[in-house]
Amino acid sequence: MTKTLEIDIRSAEGLKVNRRLIKRKTFAVVKIGDKSRISNLDESGESNPTWNHKSEITIDSCSNSGKQFIFIEVFYRTGSGRNKKIGEAKIPATDFMGRYSPEGHLNILSYRLRDEYGDKCGIVNVSIMVKPGSTEAIKDYGACSSQVRTESPSIDGYGGRIVTGVPVYCVIQRQS
Amino acid sequence: MGGCFSGDLQGGKQAIGGVQQRPTSTINNNAAHNDAVDFFFRSRGQFPLFSQIELSLSGSNLIDRDITSKSDPMAVMYLRKKDGKLEEIGRTEVILNNLNPKWIEKITVSFQFEAVQTLVFHVYDVDTRYHNVPVKTLKLKDQDFLGEATCVLSEIMTRPNRSVTLHLTGNFGAGVNRRLGTLLVQAEETIASKTVVEMNFRCINLDNKDLFSKSDPFIRISRIVENSGAVPICRTEVVDNNLNPVYRPVCLTMQQFGSKETPLVIECFDFNSSGNHELIGKTEKSVAELQRLCLQREVANFVYPSMVHDNKVLKGKLIVDRFEEKVQYSFLDYISSGFELNFMVAVDFTASNGDPRNSSSLHYIDPSGRLNSYQQAITEVGEVIQFYDSDRRFPAWGFGGRTSDGQVSHAFNLNGASYGDEVVGIEGIMAAYGNALRNVALAGPTLFSHVVDRAAHIASQSLSTNSPKYFVLLIITDGVLTDMAGTLDALVRASDLPLSVLIVGVGNADFKQMEILDADKGSRLESSTGRIATRDIVQFVPMREIHSGQVSVVQALLEELPGQFLSYVRSRKINPVGAPAV
């Protein structure tokens, strides 16, 4: 089953290249598998950039291949216009899809960035929310139920959901 | 940069005055006023007959104690108690290289109508090696004394312009009283107000005041007070070598700027390490006018005041890139709207406490009724928090003990039951504690991660329900942690949840290692998997330090609680129940 994530790449702190704070424009990339989303270029933050870039990306929540990770990579733009990687952080899916994080809950997380040599090169701050309810499942019941909601509103940011009741014969028909 | 080096400039160049972006600590210099404790007393019918007064200090003609430069003064304010001893109320910041300092940090004191409050001010010259250290950690006996002054608070309040000029006195030997300068104390009553304004400032085309490089400009905002000139309210950071600086957002409370129509003087100075900052230009705008500048994308011109002809209008301009007005609810707003604080307790059952049957043990239950350290901590903290917890059902655990099944458990139910970990009321905790002492053998080692995980699990379960709750875990321990890495991992995992962990250290162990957990002193906690704590959720207090001073365990532990609570709700834009969304 795939879930949709709302990822907000907020900011980063203490970005360093070769142990020195950088003074370049920077941007960040979120990667899950082969899908990626790129943030805007921060022009003035130097080593403490702020992006506040929101994007949506899907993740396969019932993967058979064990633990899932989201990768956040931070790059800087050199004077000649090329992009060079500062470092990356690995976010295990259990941090936002586990026992402490119900769907619809906004997870505000921070991670250590490490460069290609494994040295510390900064901190990245993100927020991740698993959008509640799988949109495909709701569409299935749309045809036979007269009281259906196509979105699940969350209440007060605490992840309260409204559940749709469904007549039994629809379930039997759609089950495959 | 000229011959007058004044040591560490970093401290001198930082921004001062604005409200902190991340409210992880309550206001400094807040003499004995704490929201949570205050509400506790008020609910008992004990209404305080006081109002909050803010004192602004400035000195003139201070003596010079430094050799190559001028003094770097800082003022400390004390209250003289009935027995003559001095209790420190607050300190200003250190101003570099200035014999006529106008300090920005205000000191707050509660004005008590029925008491004679004698205020004593000491002015110190702070040594260069202490310059980049938080002001409240400075040891005063290592600094150079510049003079002292005394006055009574009611004396200030009864003056027409609420200010008084005091002559500094001091004993510098030789029997002769040198002229040590004066201290001007200005008092203002603070009216709690919720509106906060955040602005992003930027300047362009500033004049160059430096010879071989560009100016290092910073902006100082002052409020015009009737009859007394201008009181500085905040200062941005210094941007080096830049005639078009962009500043970090400045956050001002309504208390600081008065009202949106009050005229503010906005001055742009060129920072000089000698202390003589050169004025580049100034402009006078109220907050409402700054808002208009931002909305209509206009700029304000800096002017340079001149005696000869009219103010010379400069090319330099001030731009407000962003203007945001927010309502900042206080901790009490949330509590009175229906937020609940849920209390949880974890007790240390490791062998280092000593056999409970010996009177020297920390777990000794005195038949005469005197409470041991554990019972004291539970009652004092529990009594305040239970008031905010409506159902008075508290989960209570022990750790490090060997239970009846022979295994050492690091999160066993204190009530000995297998069905649930809750007890009812503080008396329930005490009864369960006494019971557990009889049935559980003390073992070890000291591990917190299991109880922190339990507390985090309970806190995360409340996220899926609708009721707004915040959880407080009180851990009482006698010893040092065995597994710092595991505890850090558990705390980092819990840092994004509505949870605070208060740790009380009892007994005589050396708790220096525990201070790492309390992130006040340093950097954010980092787990072994590379995750960093979203916020500081730990407050650690050693019990023996408390009882020697004037402040109680309750105040020291709960001091950070409103700040941690607010950092959680504000970062998620959660408002008090029923409050309009901002």
Image: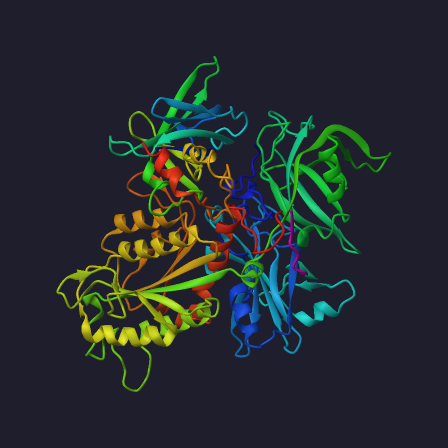
What range is drawn magenta here?
A: B190-196
Residue B530 falls left or right of residue B304: left
User: For residue A136, what is the image quadrant?
Assistant: top left
**Outermost residue, front direction?**
A169
- Looking at the picture, tell me which residue is in the foreground, B167 or B264: B264
Q: Does any portion of residue B355 appear in the rendered image?
A: no
- Looking at the picture, tell me which residue is in the foreground, A51 or A134: A134
* Residue B140 painted magenta: no
Residue B324's x, y, as percent? 65, 41
Residue at (25% x, 74% y) in the render: B363
* For residue B195, above or below residue B444: above
Residue at (33% x, 27% y) in the render: A115
* For residue B470, above or below residue B273: below
Q: Main secondary structure of the magenta part?
A: loop
Residue B477 falls left or right of residue A79: left
How are the residues colored?
rainbow
Residue A51's x, y, as percent? 51, 30
Residue B224 falls left or right of residue B408: right
User: For residue B470, what is the image quadrant?
Assistant: bottom left
Residue at (61% x, 45% y) in the render: B251
